[in-house]
Image (tube, grey):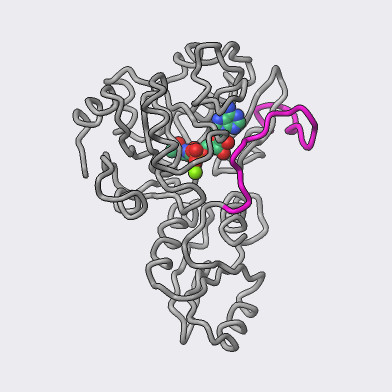
């Protein structure tokens, strides 16, 4: 069910969930201070309770409502990347619902860069907890139609058009002047490193993790297989008895096989990635074949999603 911004606000204030557009993917939003509404998110998504939610806020001034500290490094990153596809994990204030935190001592915060949702946040005065608006482990939605296809027509959706970044935000936790990359996204590690003036902490014990980063994730219903080269993919098609559809990067012809082409430029490919996978899922073939993207920094987040989808 499509709703307008006023209806969305009324529902959210009434403890209901509403799917909202962001520049990354659609989120399934609820008032981040209403435990019953937060429980609804987990129930609809069939998501494990130990997988915390990102709190979406209207601007940087709201960080102090949620975090005990806003270290200078975190402020610098927020200034550089908000509003945008970037999430900060900070030490949570005591009042922050343990449902939002998934029982972690931290809270994840993001100012999304979508005009409708920014208007919604500002007008309502709410902070919105919102995971991607899909069932647990399934493909994230980048259009209102994807949300309805995954969660059903009864879900209230604020339609803000197709998402322009296309994959979920980069997640960074900050403690003092140290930082850790918890999830790859289109804000690149090198950009954060340049601002921080030092590399991310890696592989150390006692560092916060992003729970819920399951190896199986972002998955279409049809099994996916990754190929290191176009030749290997074509070879598979020629020898396979299964019906297939291929995801190719850049130009290409694929006789005897349905295919979708992703743009050669990483940012454009990310924008179209989930949409391409949703389309390929609807082909109802037995196997999806994916050409592995270039092994370059700009493609790392896309490669991460494809690897998990193929697991
Ligand atoms: O782009 C995005 O981030 C989208 C849009 C809707 O904003 N949201 C999104 O939410 O991807 P979700 O729930 O699908 O992924 C949130 C991730 C999870 O992997 C979770 O573990 C991590 O954020 N996370 C949330 N709170 C955390 C915390 N306190 N500590 C560590 N990781 C946290
Ligand atoms: Mg998700």
Residue 170 shows in this picture: no
- Determine the main secondary structure of the stretch shown in magenta: loop
Bounds of the magenta span? 193-216
Estimate the x, y position of residue 125 in percent, counting from the top left. Answer: 32, 17
* Position of residue 146 measured from the top left corner of the image (x, y, whole percent): 34, 53
Image: 300 above or below 126: below
Q: Nearer the viewer, residue 197 or 85?
A: 85
Which quadrant is home to the C terminus? bottom right
Left or right of 6? Residue 304 is right
For residue 100, above or below residue 150: above
Q: Position of residue 97 (x, y in %)?
A: 49, 19
Write the residue at 44% across / 42% down. Answer: 132
Instruction: State which quarter of the image contains the N terminus.
Output: top left
Determine the residue positioned at 34% across, 40% down: 21
The structure residue drawn at horizontal position 50% and vertical position 12%, both measured from the top left corner, is 95
* Residue in the image at 51% along x and 50% along y: 137
| Residue projecting furthest to the right | 204
Asked if 222 appears above or below 266 in the picture, the reply is below
Q: Is residue 97 magenta?
A: no
């Amino acid at each position: 069910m499509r709703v307008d911004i006023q209806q969305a606000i009324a529902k959210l204030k009434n403890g209901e969930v509403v799917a909202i557009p962001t520049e990354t993917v659609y989120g399934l939003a609820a008032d981040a201070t209403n435990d019953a509404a937060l429980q609804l998110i987990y129930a609809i998504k069939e998501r494990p309770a130990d997988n915390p939610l990102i709190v979406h806020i209207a601007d940087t001034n709201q960080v102090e409502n949620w975090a005990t500290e806003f270290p200078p490094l975190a402020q610098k990153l927020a200034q550089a990347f908000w509003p945008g596809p970037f999430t900060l994990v900070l030490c949570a204030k005591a009042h922050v619902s343990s449902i939002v935190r998934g029982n972690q001592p931290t809270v994840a915060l993001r100012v999304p860069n979508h005009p409708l949702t920014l208007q919604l946040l500002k007008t309502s005065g709410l902070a919105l907890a919102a995971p991607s608006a899909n069932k647990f482990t399934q493909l994230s939605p980048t259009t209102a139609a994807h949300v309805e296809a995954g969660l059903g027509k009864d879900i209230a959706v604020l339609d803000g058009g197709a998402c322009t970044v296309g994959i979920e935000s980069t997640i960074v936790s900050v403690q003092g002047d140290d930082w850790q990359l918890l999830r790859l996204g289109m804000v690149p590690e090198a950009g954060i490193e340049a601002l921080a003036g030092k590399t991310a902490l890696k592989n150390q014990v006692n560092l916060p993790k992003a729970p819920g980063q399951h190896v199986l994730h972002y998955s279409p219903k049809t099994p996916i297989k990754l190929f290191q080269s176009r030749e290997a993919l074509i070879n598979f098609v020629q020898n396979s008895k299964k019906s297939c559809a291929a995801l190719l990067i850049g130009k290409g012809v694929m006789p005897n096989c349905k295919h979708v082409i992703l743009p050669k430029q990483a940012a454009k490919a990310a924008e179209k990635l989930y949409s391409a996978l949703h389309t390929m899922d609807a082909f109802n073939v037995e196997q999806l074949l994916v050409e592995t993207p270039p092994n370059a920094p700009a493609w790392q987040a896309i490669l991460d999603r494809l690897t998990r989808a193929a697991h």
